[in-house]
């Protein structure tokens, strides 16, 4: 089940607990404070308006039309960050292994 929250003023898109920072000026100009979406059998979410405080209910199709490209961009950013973190972790593990070998060599000499 996918859960998406878009917090316009913060420029944050949360997808299943993972976050991407994206400029959302266009949504702010439209008076949108946040968008909440939780994929369900019926697929209904809502748009929180900034000034009126009202929530506008949206269905799956409307969500995809209005926010689909934004969600795809956020997913790509999240995936890229996860890949970057995986590379850093692999490099760190390789460095730790090399350091361990070096320590063993120094200790045995």
Image (cartoon, rainbow, N blue to C red):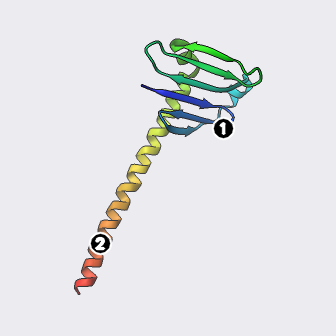
**Callout 2 crowding tier (Cα within 10 Å): few <14, some 14–19, many ≥20:** few
In the rendered view of the protein, which quadrant contains the N terminus?
top left
Residue 33 screen position, x and y as percent: 69, 27
Q: Is residue 96 above or below residue 39?
A: below
In the rendered view of the protein, which quadrant contains the C terminus?
bottom left
Q: Is residue 39 above or below residue 88?
A: above
Residue 50 screen position, x and y as percent: 73, 25
- Residue lying furthest right: 51
Q: Alpha-carbon distance for marks 1 and 2?
A: 43 Å
Determine whether the residue tagged by mark 1 lies in a helix, strand or loop.
loop
> Which residue does the numbered mark 1 point to in the structure image?
10
Residue 22 screen position, x and y as percent: 60, 36
Determine whether the residue tagged by mark 2 lies in a helix, strand or loop.
helix
Q: Is residue 17 above or below residue 107?
A: above
Residue 5 screen position, x and y as percent: 56, 29
Query: At 52% from the left edge and 12% from the top edge, which residue is drawn?
Result: 61
Nearest to N terminus: mark 1 or mark 2: 1
**Callout 1 crowding tier (Cα within 10 Å): few <14, some 14–19, many ≥20:** few
Residue 83 sits in quarter? top left
Residue 47 sits in quarter? top right
Query: At 29% from the left edge and 72% from the top edge, which residue is drawn?
Result: 100
**55 with respect to 3 (left or right):** right
> Which residue does the numbered mark 2 point to in the structure image?
100
In depth, the one of 33 and 99 nearer the eye is 33
Q: Are marks 1 and 2 in contact (CB under 8 Å)?
A: no
Query: At 25% from the left edge and 80% from the top edge, which residue is drawn?
Result: 105
């Amino acid at each position: 089940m996918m859960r998406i929250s878009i917090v316009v003023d913060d420029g944050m898109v949360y997808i299943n607990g993972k976050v991407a920072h994206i400029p959302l000026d266009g949504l702010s100009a439209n008076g949108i404070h946040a968008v909440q979406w939780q994929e369900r059998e019926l697929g209904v979410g809502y748009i929180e308006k900034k000034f009126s405080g009202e929530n506008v209910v949206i269905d799956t199709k409307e969500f995809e039309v209005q926010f689909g490209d934004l969600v795809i961009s956020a997913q790509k950013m999240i995936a890229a960050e996860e890949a970057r973190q995986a590379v850093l972790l692999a490099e760190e593990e390789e460095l730790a292994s090399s350091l361990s070998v070096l320590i063993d060599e120094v200790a045995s000499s």
